[in-house]
Image (spheres, helix red, strand yellow):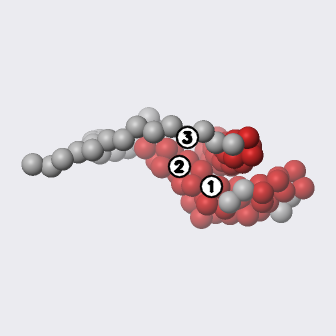
Amino acid sequence: MAVQLRYNFRLYPTPAQCQSLARAFGCARVVFNDGLRLREEAHRAGLAYVPDGVLQKRVTTDAQRTPERAWLTEVSAVVLQQAVADLNRAYRGGPGSCQRHRRR
């Protein structure tokens, strides 16, 4: 017999922590949306599927080198990489996927 424990807890971040979290979430959203836009544009143009590595390089590394997106360097690279990984997973498992049986 397995015992399952569950804990409820609440975090109360300081104003500085709230600002850091908001910055991280905002950067992740921008990277996710940029990657989605690139994938959709490639699909509409009839181009091949943009590989994950190329997509990550374009929306994180290359974007950080532009003046418009230089502020992406203010957050951890892990946040940006996870946003791209989430996009890749969502894009493959979305309504247009060819899988007949979903994982449970």
Dot 2 and dot 3 residues touching (CB under 8 Å): no
For numbered disc 3, what is the local secondary structure? loop
Q: Tell me the number on the disc at residue 79.
A: 1
Which residue is depicted at the point 78% across and 57% down? Answer: 74
Nearest to viewer (mark 2 / mark 1): 1
Mark toward the start of the polypeptide (2 vs 1): 1
- SS at circle 2: helix
Q: Viewer-proximal residue, 14 or 77?
A: 14
Query: What crowding class fits label 3: few (fewer than 14 Cα within 10 Å), some (14-19), or many (20 or more)?
Result: few
Quick check: can you spot residue 26? no
Which element type, helix, strand or loop, lies under badge 1?
helix
Task: Give how far across and how far down residue 23 sits, in percent.
Answer: 73, 46
Q: In the rendered image, is residue 18 in sight?
A: yes
Q: Amino acid at mark 1?
A: Val
Q: Residue at x 53, y 49 (%)?
A: 86
Say whether disc 2 or disc 3 marks the residue closer to the N-terminus. 3
Q: Which residue is mark 3?
A: 11
Residue 102 in which image quadrant:
top left
Q: Position of residue 18 (x, y in %)?
A: 70, 41
CB within 8 Å, label 2 to label 1: no
Mark 3 → mark 1, Cα distance in angstroms: 20 Å
Q: Where 84 falls versus 19 (above or below)?
A: below
Other-residue count near label 1 (Cα within 10 Å), few / some / many at <14 / 14–19 / ≥20? some
Question: How many numbered discs, if any?
Answer: 3
Mark 3 or mark 1, which is nearer to you?
3
Q: Residue at x 75, y 46 (%)?
A: 16
